[in-house]
Each structure stands twice: as structure tokens, then as C-alpha cells.
Image (cartoon, rainbow, N blue to C red):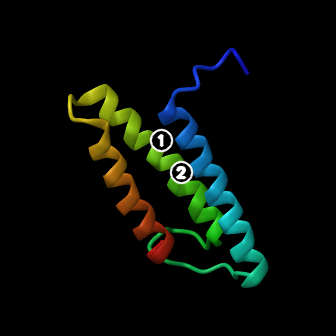
């Protein structure tokens, strides 16, 4: 694992993803979900919405880095709100 630069933000990111996956797995075992339609144009499960949210959050962060000089924390807060909206009403 020497090949990767394990900074604190990098470690926290991967720990956060692992915690989310464990939480979603536990939630699925306790309360199995069914597909539903929200504002997304397709029927999705919780896992589908999580994947869509993580993927779109990556693009939001890339856009902030490429197009603005704004602190990346702003993008992180924006993505947190986006994930909440997507998981609840997506």
C-alpha cells in the first residue's frame, strides 16, 4: 500500500465509504427495500440511489476543482445536501 499517498483526507474518505456500505448493508438486512420511483426517471432501490449519488458527487467535486477557485469544502457540503435529497426523494 506504499504506492498510495495515504493522507488524512484520503483515509477519511475511504473510511467514510466503508461506513456507508456497512450501514446500507445492515439497513438492507433489517428492512429489505423495494424499487420505487421518485424524481429520477427510473425505478431505483436504495443501493441504486447511493451509487448514483456517489457518482454524481464525484463529478460535482471534479467540476469544482476544474472550474472554480472555491474551497473544496463547499463542494462537499453541496454533495451532502445532494445525497440527502437523492436518497429521500430520488
| Relative side of 27 to 9, left or right | right
Read off the residue under disc 2. 54
Q: Which of 69 and 23 is in front in this view?
A: 23
- Residue 48, x across and y down, in percent: 63, 63
> Few, some or many C-alpha atoms within 10 Å of disc 1 (few <14, some 14-19, many ≥20)?
some
Secondary structure state at the residue bearing disc 1? helix
Q: Residue at position x 53%, y 47% from top?
A: 55
Specify whether 88 is left or right of 19: left
Q: Nearer the viewer, residue 1 or 34?
A: 1
Q: Where is residue 25 in the image (x, y as percent from the top left)?
A: 74, 67
Q: Which residue is drawn at 39% across and 39% down?
A: 61
Which mark is on residue 58? Answer: 1
32, above or below 10, in the image: below
Contact between labelled residues 1 and 2, with CB atoms less than 8 Å apart: yes
Residue name at image x 55 percent, y 78 percent: 37
Q: How many discs mark residues in the rendered view? A: 2
Residue furthest right as drawn: 29
Amino acid at each position: 500500500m506504499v504506492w498510495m499517498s495515504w493522507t488524512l483526507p484520503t483515509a477519511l474518505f475511504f473510511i467514510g465509504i466503508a461506513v456507508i456500505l456497512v450501514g446500507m448493508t445492515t439497513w438492507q438486512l433489517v428492512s429489505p427495500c423495494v424499487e420505487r420511483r421518485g424524481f429520477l426517471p427510473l425505478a431505483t432501490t436504495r443501493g441504486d440511489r447511493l451509487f448514483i449519488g456517489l457518482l454524481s458527487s464525484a463529478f460535482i467535486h471534479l467540476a469544482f476543482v476544474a472550474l472554480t477557485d472555491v474551497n473544496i469544502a463547499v463542494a462537499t457540503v453541496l454533495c451532502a445536501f445532494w445525497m440527502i435529497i437523492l436518497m429521500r426523494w430520488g
